[in-house]
Image (cartoon, rainbow, N blue to C red):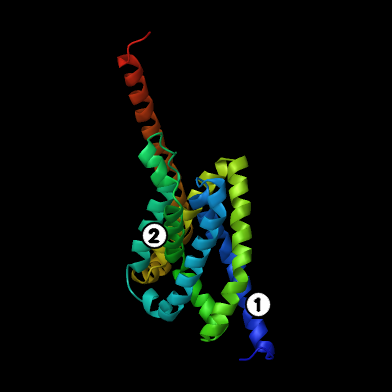
Amino acid sequence: MSFDDPQFWIAVLQIIAIDIVLGGDNAVVIALACRRLPEDQRKLGIFWGVFGAIALRVVLIFFALSLLAIPYLKIVGGVLLLWIGVKLLQPESDGEHEVDASTTLMGAIKTIIVADAVMSLDNVIAIAGAAKDEMGLVVFGLIISVPIIVWGSQLVMKLMESFPVTIAIGAGLLGWIAGDMFVSDVATKQWVEAQANYLHWIAPMAGAILVVFVGKMIARLKSDKQKAIVDLVDDTVPKK
């Protein structure tokens, strides 16, 4: 297809529409990963995170059908996504080394790319189908969609600053996606559709609840531990 072919622009619009629909998940991941960065590094984190995620998605399109045919791949990816969701719910540590580790530009970029790789296994098939196997068209459509995803992530980040509860909602969304991946894997899909179709709703809800519950519980334990350490230090330091 060429630029003067109406089918070309229809395919581009289809790819952009797919990315708008799926970009909400990416925006949540980007916002969660970049929310602890210093203000002057957030735009860099968003840019390179999106750039790496889009580049990875283009590469995945080459292997999409083969990857999704591998049994248990989605289950492994779902477990990884659960871990990312729980990790993103953890509070910043007062320890200098840990604060640096959780607020680095590279750390945010890695989180974005890893999460997007897990979440893109289904998405790339839709994009490849719209592009009709033309890689140049895929890249063109994805490049156009980048500003949309970036704007979405900045909007989500502002919401997280104003309303901290959106952090838990975002992490829960990752758990929801993970739960859906468990029941749509090649190894489980046929059995679920034949014997337990209700799991298509229950598994995502369970994943969301699990991430928020475990994430909050671990965060509370860490907070209590840090408070106990502070109290112990205060008790051992001679008072003037």
Residue named by callout 2? 78
Does residue 107 sit above or below 75 in this rendering? above
Pointer 2 or 1: first along the chain: 1
Q: Give the residue at x 46% y 50%.
A: 208
Q: Position of residue 117 (x, y in %)?
A: 43, 66
Does residue 67 sit above or below 238 in this rendering? below
Q: Which amino acid does label 1 sit on?
A: Leu
Does residue 227 sit above or below 187 in this rendering? above
Q: Are marks 2 and 1 in contact (CB under 8 Å)?
A: no
Q: Can residue 116 be seen in this view?
A: yes
Q: In which quarter of the image is residue 188?
A: bottom left
Does residue 91 sit above or below 199 in this rendering? above
- 187 left or right, relative to 28: left
Q: Which amino acid does label 2 sit on?
A: Gly
Real-space Cα separation, disc 2 to disc 1, in angstroms: 30 Å
Q: Look at the image and tell me in which quarter the C terminus lies.
A: top left
**Which residue is more in the foreground, 99 or 9?**
99
Residue named by callout 1? 13
Q: Position of residue 180 (x, y in %)?
A: 45, 61
Q: Residues within 10 Å of mark 1 (few under 14, many from 20)?
A: some
Q: Looking at the rendered structure, which numbered label has been put on residue 143?
A: none
Q: Is residue 203 visible?
A: no
Q: Give the residue at x 37% y 41%.
A: 98
Badge 1 marks a residue whose secondary structure is helix
